[in-house]
Image (cartoon, rainbow, N blue to C red):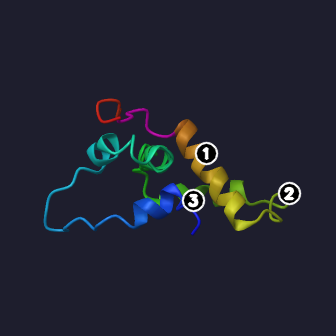
Amino acid sequence: MPKKSELEMYLDEQKIDRKIELYILHFWKANQYRFPEVSAIARDILCILISIVASESDFSNSGRILDQYRSALKHDIVEALVCVKDWLYGDKGAIFLNFYL
């Protein structure tokens, strides 16, 4: 029988009762040695800042994003460009999660 991957071991864990209060960053900090790779992925995903810009106003720039030169870009590339622009020029009031990591 082949050895299970770290992800398979994590997915085989007993499910946590949804009725209890769970702080996801505390969970991954407590389990970082049991699941080092999965916890690193979770930290990478959970540390992404949430955009507070309304989607309508954000996409009002669409004329500048998709012009005659960029109209051949795939949807996922355009989405990535919009995200990078938001990360670079978005709200500077970042939330620091160092306490939890």
* Of the image marks 1 and 2, the number of the one nearer the N terminus: 2
Q: Which residue is mark 2?
A: 69
Q: Tell me where the magenta segment starts and ends, as one range.
A: 90-95
Q: Which residue is mark 1?
A: 84
Q: Position of residue 50 (x, y in %)?
A: 41, 49
State the separation of the CA atoms marked 1 and 2. Answer: 19 Å
Q: Which residue is mark 3?
A: 60
Which corner quadrant holds the C terminus?
A: top left
Residue drawn at 27 percent across, 43 percent down: 26
* Of the image marks 2 and 3, the number of the one nearer the N terminus: 3
Q: Nearer the viewer, mark 1 or mark 2?
A: 1
Q: Position of residue 13 (x, y in %)?
A: 34, 64
For the view shown, which residue lies furthest in the front direction?
A: 1
Question: Element type at marker 3?
Answer: helix
State the separation of the CA atoms marked 2 and 3. Answer: 18 Å
**Residue 67 appears left or right of 16:** right
State the separation of the CA atoms marked 1 and 3. Answer: 16 Å
What kind of residue is marked 1? Val
Question: Element type at marker 1?
Answer: helix
Q: Position of residue 74 (x, y in %)?
A: 76, 65
Residue drawn at 29 percent across, 67 percent down: 14
Instruction: Relative to 72, say whether 98 is above or below.
Output: above
**Residue 81 appears left or right of 11:** right
Mark 3 neighbour class, 10 Å CA radius: few under 14, some 14 to 19, many 20 or more:
few
Label 1–label 2 contact, CB within 8 A? no
Mark 1 neighbour class, 10 Å CA radius: few under 14, some 14 to 19, many 20 or more:
few
2 or 22: which is nearer to us?
2
Question: Element type at marker 2?
Answer: loop
**Magenta stretch contains residue 72:** no
